[in-house]
Image (cartoon, helix red, strand yellow):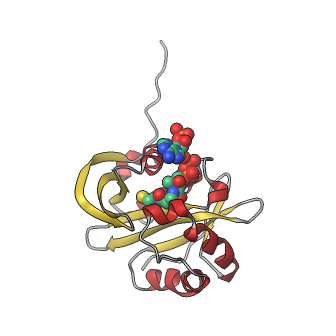
């Protein structure tokens, strides 16, 4: 299993979920856009949020499936979203990232900043060899997040996803350790 960890970026602290996140998780996961793109319980109740924050998110790490982070504002400490790893293949050293951003935090690059931090941690610190990201072909915002975070598109997985609206095609993205290298410097002669 992954070690319990806290990650820092310029604006964010990524930490384990706890009971203080229940009201904001409830509001974020009951939100219409989150419900459109993620197959969460519908309706999403306060009990669902309580279970996620206090039990399910932690059980997923304990099981080896991945690790789940509450994305919080480094200054106000308020919940801004979630980013996590799932479906981890420990033999191949491959995992998959997923995320949602709270309605009050959208449009500020939070998802890309949190996803980039998690990718760095996984591919550099944890020495994984591949991180995957899947986004519905119509989920333009999520595909922009993937590109901004440094992922490479690999193609379309037909009929591979399901949301409340039905089956969807998914764009597959990946990031490898070599993708983390800073761009080569160019000098003017
Ligand atoms: C997808 C999501 C995580 C993006 O989070 P975010 O932190 O607001 O992302 P950003 O601020 O970087 O915005 C993403 C980009 O998409 C654009 N965008 C937002 N909504 C859009 C829409 N409906 N159509 C086209 N572009 C859109 C933004 O303008 C931004 O573009 P820019 O980088 O060129 O400025 C957030 O919208 C969300 O929580 N959606 C619901 C859950 C979800 O889709 N999760 C991902 C499943 S794969």
Residue 180 or residue 151, whichever sits in front: 151
Q: For this view, does 65 lie left or right of residue 31?
A: left
* Residue 121 visible within the image: no
In which image quadrant can residue 25 be found?
bottom right
Q: Please give the name of the residue rendered at 59% of the width and 75% of the height, measured from the top-left corner.
A: 16
- Check the image and name the residue furthest to the left: 158
- Check the image and name the residue furthest to the top: 189
In which image quadrant can residue 29 be found?
bottom right
Residue 96 or residue 23, whichever sits in front: 23
Relative to 47, residue 71 above or below: above
Residue 86 or residue 134, whichever sits in front: 134
* Residue 164 visible within the image: yes
Q: Please give the name of the residue rendered at 67% of the width and 57% of the height, measured from the top-left corner.
A: 104
Q: Please give the name of the residue rendered at 62% of the width and 58% of the height, measured from the top-left corner.
A: 103
Quadrant holding the N terminus: bottom left
Residue 156 percent across, percent down from the top left: 25, 50
Residue 105 percent across, percent down from the top left: 65, 55
Residue 116 percent across, percent down from the top left: 50, 53
Residue 14 percent across, percent down from the top left: 60, 65
Q: For this view, does 84 lie left or right of residue 73?
A: left
Q: How many marks?
A: 0
Q: Please give the name of the residue rendered at 48% of the width and 20% of the height, measured from the top-left corner.
A: 187
């Amino acid at each position: 299993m992954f070690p319990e960890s806290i990650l820092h970026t310029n604006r964010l602290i990524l930490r384990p979920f706890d009971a203080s996140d229940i009201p904001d998780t409830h509001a974020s996961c009951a939100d219409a856009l989150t419900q459109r793109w993620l197959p969460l319980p519908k309706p999403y109740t306060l009990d669902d949020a309580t279970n996620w924050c206090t039990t399910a998110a932690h059980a997923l790490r304990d099981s080896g499936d991945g690790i789940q982070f509450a994305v919080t504002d480094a200054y106000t400490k308020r919940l801004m979203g979630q980013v996590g790893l799932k479906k981890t293949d420990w033999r191949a050293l491959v995992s998959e990232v997923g995320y949602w951003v709270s309605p009050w935090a959208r449009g500020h690059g939070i998802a890309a900043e949190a996803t980039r931090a998690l990718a760095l941690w996984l591919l550099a610190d944890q020495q994984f060899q591949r991180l995957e990201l899947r986004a519905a072909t119509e989920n333009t915002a999520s595909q922009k997040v993937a590109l901004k975070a440094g992922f490479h598109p690999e193609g379309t997985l037909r009929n591979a996803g399901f949301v409340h609206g039905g089956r969807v095609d998914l764009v597959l993205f990946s990031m490898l350790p070599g993708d983390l290298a800073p761009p080569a410097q160019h000098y003017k002669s």
